[in-house]
Image: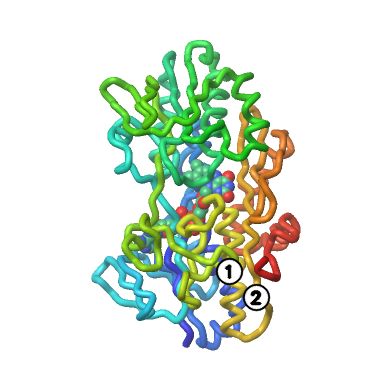
Amino acid sequence: MIKIAMIGGGAGGLITTSKLSAELSEEIKQEKVSITIFDRKETQEFQPGYLETAFRGTKPEKLKRPVDKLISKGVKTVHADCASLDLDNHQIITEKNQEKYDFDYVIVSTGCSPDYSQIPGLKEANMDFYTDAEVSSRIFSTLQTIKSGRIVVGIAGLPYKCPPSPNEAAFMADEYLRRHDLRKNVDITFITPYTRIYTAEPINEVIEPLYSERNIESRTVFNTDSVDPARKEITSLEGDTVKYDYLFLTPPHKPAEFLKGTDFADDEGWVKVDKRDLHITDHDYAFAIGDTNNIPTSKAGVEAHLEGIVVANNLAMNVTGEGTKHFFTGRTQCSMETGFHHATFVVGTYDRPVEKIKPTVTNYAEKKVMEGIYWASLHGHYEWLFKYHFKKDYFAESPT
Ligand SMILES: Cc1cc2nc3c(=O)[nH]c(=O)nc-3n(C[C@H](O)[C@H](O)[C@H](O)COP(=O)(O)OP(=O)(O)OC[C@H]3O[C@@H](n4cnc5c(N)ncnc54)[C@H](O)[C@@H]3O)c2cc1C
């Protein structure tokens, strides 16, 4: 029996195991292969929906699905946290009862989460749309009480997931206030450590004029050092300050705790992988996909998806001895809502810089279609559409 372990049953974990279960269905039926997901959660959430919950009031329950309904045929689950991963001895130890599980192949897809410990005062002062749906809904409850003052949004620290999301928050807060005829009483300030409003110049060129048009103030090269909740003031490493009444900042993110201090992760715990085939450095039977690895691309669901498809293909090929090896192209495609039913996309690969795409209603409609098929896509039902959409970026047949 060949044992395949997936640590993390979120976006990357589910799409990868669904592809593996399809590719290895015969082997699973004949009990030659087993696939097991390790994850503490019994419910998954549609994370891109946190913005809708925060700024449009979508109910948290609408973003949730029970994990058992998302698992593909033949895939088993262990509802437990992974406490340690010993790659050399092929062993996972779970937190609950310190149980040990052996594997032949392992894939890590444990994502990342807000790390408030890095910025003094931030936790007390901030409301975010990254932790979970309930925490995001606190922003909407607060928005409904605002009559005047200053909202500060933006990037408090790096890295974080979904690069456009802080900008989306600025546009969505602006839209909410305009629709409620409150914009003239409420200022919006966007802070960022980068030298421009959006780090990739082609996208900056399309959104910077919108910031001026919508009267959203921006403070660039602002590296948040600390927040003083009593004075309602943010101080940067550069020595600047920004006053706020309401703080909806993007906190820096961290990987899962058990990865820190291992020899296969960097000093902060991001897993070191080959950026083309996603194998963990020096371990060709171990892989890391999605937000938790250290590849030079965005931390976003599209990457987790396309990386997972590559890893599942190559792993199935190792097991069956059939097929050809695939490589990840570095393709990103993050939607950026610019308010009032318009959106742009941040699109690029390892070899092609980010494109300049103007915000349109059509892009917004495409984003909505993608949201509509999200849960079904985790079962692999829409792979034909992704293959058609991403074309030569879906995977590469050679590493260069
Ligand atoms: C506001 C917002 C907007 C976004 N918008 C977009 C978008 O428009 N487009 C896009 O592509 N992406 C978007 N994303 C990002 C996308 O949701 C993530 O990049 C994606 O979910 C990453 O998949 P993953 O598998 O790496 O991690 P996740 O989906 O986060 O899954 C990680 C899983 O690992 C589990 N886990 C963690 N630690 C352990 C442990 N020790 N043991 C066992 N299990 C563990 C967790 O419980 C979780 O289920 C957005 C995210 C946010 C927050």
Q: Mark on residue 165? A: none
> How many numbered circles are shown?
2
Estimate how packed mark 1 is, as few (under 14), some (14 to 19) or many (20 or more) residues with alpha carbons within 10 Å: many
- Counting residues from the start of the chain, the first of labels 1 and 2 encountered is 1
Find residue 54 and report its horizontal and vertical position in percent: 47, 34
Amino acid type, label 1: Asp
Find residue 235 and report its horizontal and vertical position in percent: 35, 27
Residue 172 appears left or right of 373: left
- Looking at the image, what colour scheme do you see? rainbow
How far is disc 1 from disc 2 in space, using C-alphas? 9 Å
Name of the residue lying farthest toward the left? 97
Q: Mark 1 points at which residue?
A: 277
Amino acid type, label 2: Lys
Name of the residue lying farthest toward the top? 184
Q: Mark 2 points at which residue?
A: 325
Callout 1–callout 2 Cβ contact below 8 Å = yes
Residue at 70 percent across and 70 percent down: it is 397
Residue at 49 percent across and 73 percent down: it is 75
